Image (cartoon, helix red, strand yellow):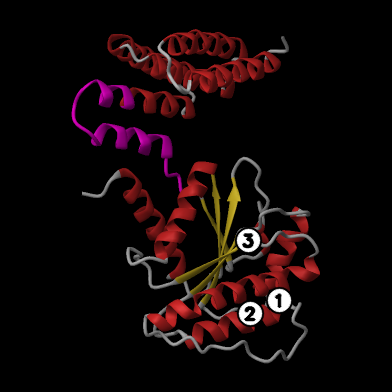
C-alpha cells in the first residue's frame, strides 16, 4: 500500500502527465504553498531515480534571475555543468555520453540558442526520454516583471513538443500571475492542493505500533493540520490530548514541543497574546526538562525564550 507521501507524489505525476499529454503546451507553472513546492522538488528528484514513473528527464536549473540578457547563458552553463559531472557515471552504466553542444549560429546569450542546445540534447537521448524538462527554479529574482517577460520570450522561440518548461511559483508571493493569459495555449498553471499537513497526520496514524508514542505523534500532527486549516479549536483540542499523553508518560520535553507547536499556530492566526502564553508554558516545561539533566535543556530553554520574544514583539508588548 502506498503511504501518504507516495500518494501525493503519484498525484503530482498524474498532473504532470496530463500537462505533457497536450502537444500544444510548453510551460507548467506550479502555484503552490511552500509545503507543496517541497513535494514538487521531491517529485523532480524521484523522476531521476528508478522509482520515477514518467518517461521524461527533468533538469533543475537554479541560477538567479538578474540581468535578463545573461539569464539564458547562465542557464546554459548550469545545464552543461550538470551534464559534465554525470558523463563518467553514464559511461559506467554503458550509456553513451558523447553529446556535444552544437555550434552557435546565434549569440549564445540568446534564448534561441538555449532552445537549440536543449533540443539537440533531447534528440541525442531520444531513446531514453520522451521530453526534456527544464525546471527553472531561480534562487532569487531581481525583477519579477522581467522574469515573466523573459519566459514569454522563451515560449515564443518555437519550442518543440519534446522540450518542456516547469516553473515553481510560491502561492504566498507569486511571481507569475497572469502568465497563462499572456501566453495562451502555451502556459498553464496548476495548484496541486496536496494537503501536506493532512499527509503528515496520515503518516502518524499509519506508522508504528499502538501505544502512547503513536497517540502522541497523531495528535502532534493534528495540531499543525488543524492550524493550517484555520481551525484553532481543533488545534487546541489536539494539543490537549497530546499534553495528556506527555503528562501520563512524564515526557516534559515532548510537552514543550506541544506548547511550541500550538504557539506557532496562534502566531499564524494573529493571536499573539495566546502565543505568548503557550511559549511561557514551554519555558516551564523547559525547566522541568533541565531538572532531569536532559542534555538538550539549554537549547530548549533558548527556543522557548526566543519564541516568547517573537510573540511579544508581534503583540506590540
Residue 68, quarter of picture:
bottom right
For marks 3 and 1, give the one nearer the viewer. Answer: 3
User: Going 37% across and 12% down the picture, which residue do you hit?
Assistant: 240
Q: Is residue 119 left or right of residue 241?
A: right
Label 3, on which residue? 62
Q: Is residue 119 visible?
A: yes
Magenta-colored span: 192-217
Which residue, given by chain and number where applicable, does mark 2 sit on?
115
Q: Is residue 86 left or right of residue 147?
A: left
Badge 3 or badge 1: first in the primary sequence: 3
Q: Are marks 1 and 2 in contact (CB under 8 Å)?
A: yes
Numbered badge on residue 111: 1
> Residue sitting at 76 percent across and 77 percent down?
109
Q: CA distance from mark 3 to mark 1?
A: 16 Å
* Relative depth, front residue between 18 and 268: 268
Disc 1 to disc 2, C-alpha distance = 6 Å
Amino acid at each position: 500500500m502506498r503511504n501518504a507521501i507516495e500518494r501525493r507524489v503519484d498525484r503530482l505525476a498524474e498532473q504532470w502527465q496530463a500537462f505533457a499529454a497536450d502537444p500544444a503546451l510548453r510551460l507548467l507553472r506550479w502555484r503552490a504553498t511552500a509545503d507543496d513546492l517541497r513535494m514538487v522538488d521531491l517529485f523532480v528528484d524521484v523522476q531521476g531515480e528508478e522509482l520515477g514513473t514518467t518517461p521524461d528527464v527533468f533538469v533543475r536549473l537554479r541560477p538567479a534571475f538578474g540581468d535578463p540578457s545573461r539569464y539564458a547563458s547562465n542557464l546554459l552553463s548550469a545545464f552543461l555543468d550538470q551534464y559534465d559531472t554525470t558523463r563518467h557515471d553514464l559511461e559506467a552504466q554503458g550509456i553513451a555520453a558523447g553529446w556535444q553542444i552544437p555550434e552557435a549560429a546565434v549569440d549564445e546569450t540568446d534564448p534561441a540558442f538555449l532552445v537549440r542546445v536543449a533540443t539537440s540534447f533531447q534528440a541525442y537521448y531520444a531513446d531514453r526520454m520522451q521530453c526534456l524538462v527544464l525546471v527553472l527554479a531561480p534562487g532569487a529574482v531581481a525583477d519579477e516583471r522581467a522574469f515573466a517577460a523573459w519566459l514569454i520570450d522563451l515560449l515564443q522561440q518555437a519550442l518543440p513538443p519534446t522540450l518542456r518548461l516547469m516553473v515553481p511559483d510560491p502561492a504566498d508571493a507569486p511571481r507569475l500571475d497572469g502568465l497563462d493569459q499572456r501566453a495562451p495555449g502555451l502556459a498553464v498553471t496548476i495548484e496541486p492542493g496536496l494537503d501536506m499537513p493532512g499527509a503528515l497526520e496520515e503518516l502518524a496514524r499509519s506508522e508504528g505500533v499502538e501505544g502512547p508514542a503513536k497517540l502522541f505523534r497523531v495528535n502532534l500532527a493534528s495540531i499543525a493540520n488543524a492550524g493550517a486549516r484555520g481551525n484553532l479549536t481543533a488545534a487546541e483540542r489536539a494539543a490537549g490530548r497530546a499534553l495528556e499523553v506527555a503528562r501520563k508518560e512524564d515526557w516534559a520535553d515532548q510537552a514543550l514541543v506541544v506548547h511550541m507547536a500550538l504557539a506557532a499556530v496562534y502566531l499564524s492566526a494573529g493571536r499573539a497574546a495566546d502565543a505568548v502564553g503557550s511559549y511561557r508554558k514551554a519555558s516551564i516545561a523547559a525547566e522541568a526538562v533541565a531538572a532531569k539533566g536532559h542534555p538538550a535543556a539549554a537549547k530548549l530553554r533558548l527556543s522557548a525564550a526566543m519564541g516568547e520574544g517573537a510573540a511579544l514583539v508581534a503583540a506590540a508588548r
